[in-house]
Structures are given as C-alpha cells and as structure tokens.
C-alpha cells in the first residue's frame, strides 16, 4: 500500500521479490503479447487517473486544480499515472518590463506543475524559508501528513486495481498460451 514517510516524500511499497518476478515476466514476453498487456493496462491507468480527478476535485488546496491539468497516463505494461512535472500551469508571473514602455511585462512564465504538487497534496504552514524570509500559508490548507487527494485516492483504489491487473496478466498469459 501507499505509505507517507516524512515531508514531501510519497512512496508506494511493493514486495521486491514479487516486483522482480513481475518485471521478469513482462520482459520475457514477445512484442505482440507485450502490446496486449499495454493495451489492457491503459484502461486501468485511466481509471486510476479518474479516481485522482475525483479526489482532487474535493481537495481544499486551490492549486490542486492546476496540478490536475498535468495528469497523464502513458501507455505502459504497468499501470502508470504521471502527475506534476514541467508542464506550466496557472497564471503567468515574473518577467521584465517591455521595451515599449507601455507597462506590459514580457518573458513571463507560469509555475511548473511539479513545483505545486507536494503543496497541493499535503498543504502548508507559515514559516521562514532558507534565507530567512517569512511566508504565509501558501497552499491555504493546513499541513496534513496523510495527504489531501493523491494518497487517499491511491489507498482507496489500489486494492481494486491490483486485483484487476493480476487477472488481466493471467488472462493475457492464458490467451497467449504461455502458462
């Protein structure tokens, strides 16, 4: 299951021997069978992403809606959902004054979703940064060690997903007569 250890760290623990066996099995599959597994795993990834959207829509941090724009489900042999990363989300900030002198700003940039990810998941609290500047509760919701949307969605849906993924792998192996 999912475990949260420390601030800003999110880990999903899997029995190493079982994972090694699964990866060994997936690597041993021929290209056609591996594509069948990818085709069957994609809908499971999309359903997990749907759960993340559902839990994210109830999160008290306003940045969650921005981070949810970055959710993607790459086609893979394993169930995979990517959140965050370099995708620019939200309103633009910073930049410099334009040379025209009309007060417009140029070279503005939006925040990358990855920079907002952990604050949207765990909230924040007022404090002092590494160079001594005071800051307020940046993510509006107070710090919550158990998470607001990613951890609850994963904890809720992983037992269902694991069972369906196991059945799907067994069906593909049986269909390909590899057992």
Image: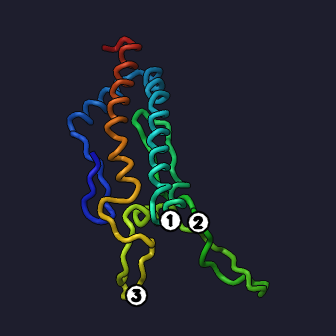
Quadrant of the image for the N terminus? Answer: top left
Q: Mark 1 and mark 3: span between their CA atoms?
A: 22 Å
| Image: 128 above or below 174 | below
Q: Residue at x 34, y 69 (%)?
A: 143
Residue under label 3? 133
Nearer the N terminus, badge 1 or badge 2? 1
Please state if 44 lies on the left or on the right of 96 as rendered. left
Work out whether 113 lies above or below 31.
below
Q: Position of residue 19 (x, y in %)?
A: 27, 36
Q: Nearer the viewer, residue 12 or 49?
A: 49
In this figure, which residue is indicated by the disc labeled 2?
90
Q: How would you rate the neighbour count of disc 3 (Cα within 10 Å): few for under 14, some for 14-19, many for 20 or more?
A: few
Q: Is the image coloured rainbow, by chain, by secondary structure, or in one colour? A: rainbow
SS state under label 3: loop
Q: Using the image as rendered, state which of residue 63 and residue 59 is in the foreground.
A: 59
Residue 54, x across and y down, in percent: 48, 49
User: Which quadrant would residue 159 be assigned to in this image?
Assistant: top left
Badge 3 or badge 2: first in the primary sequence: 2
Q: Nearer the viewer, residue 132 or 47?
A: 47
Q: Answer whether labels 1 and 2 touch (C-beta < 8 Å).
A: yes
The residue that mark 1 highlights is: 63
Left or right of residue 72, residue 162 in this image: left
Residue 35: x and y in percent read 48, 26
Q: Which residue appears at 38% of the width and 18% of the height?
A: 171
Pinpoint residue 31: horizontal percent, then vertical percent. 45, 23
SS at badge 2: strand
Q: Are marks 3 and 2 in contact (CB under 8 Å)?
A: no
The Cα–Cα distance between marks 3 and 2, rounded to whole angstroms, is 24 Å
Q: Which image quarter: residue 25?
A: top left
Residue 30 to residue 13: above or below: above
Q: Is residue 102 shown above or below 51?
A: below
């Amino acid at each position: 299951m999912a475990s949260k250890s420390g601030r800003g760290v999110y880990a999903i623990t899997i029995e190493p021997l079982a994972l090694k066996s699964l990866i060994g099995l997936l690597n041993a599959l021929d290209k056609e069978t591996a594509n069948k597994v990818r085709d069957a795993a994609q809908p499971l990834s999309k359903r997990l992403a749907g759960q993340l959207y559902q839990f994210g829509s109830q999160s008290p941090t306003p940045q969650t809606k921005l981070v949810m724009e970055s959710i993607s489900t790459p086609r893979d042999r394993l169930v995979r959902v990517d959140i965050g990363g370099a995708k620019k989300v939200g309103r633009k900030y910073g930049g410099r004054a334009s040379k025209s002198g009309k007060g417009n700003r140029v070279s503005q940039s939006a925040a990358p979703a990855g920079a907002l990810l952990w604050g949207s998941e765990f909230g924040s609290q007022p404090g002092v940064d590494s160079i001594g500047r005071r800051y307020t509760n940046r993510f509006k919701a107070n710090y919550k060690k158990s998470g607001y949307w990613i951890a609850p969605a994963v904890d809720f849906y992983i037992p269902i997903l694991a069972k369906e993924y196991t059945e799907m792998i067994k069906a593909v192996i049986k269909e390909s007569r590899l057992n």
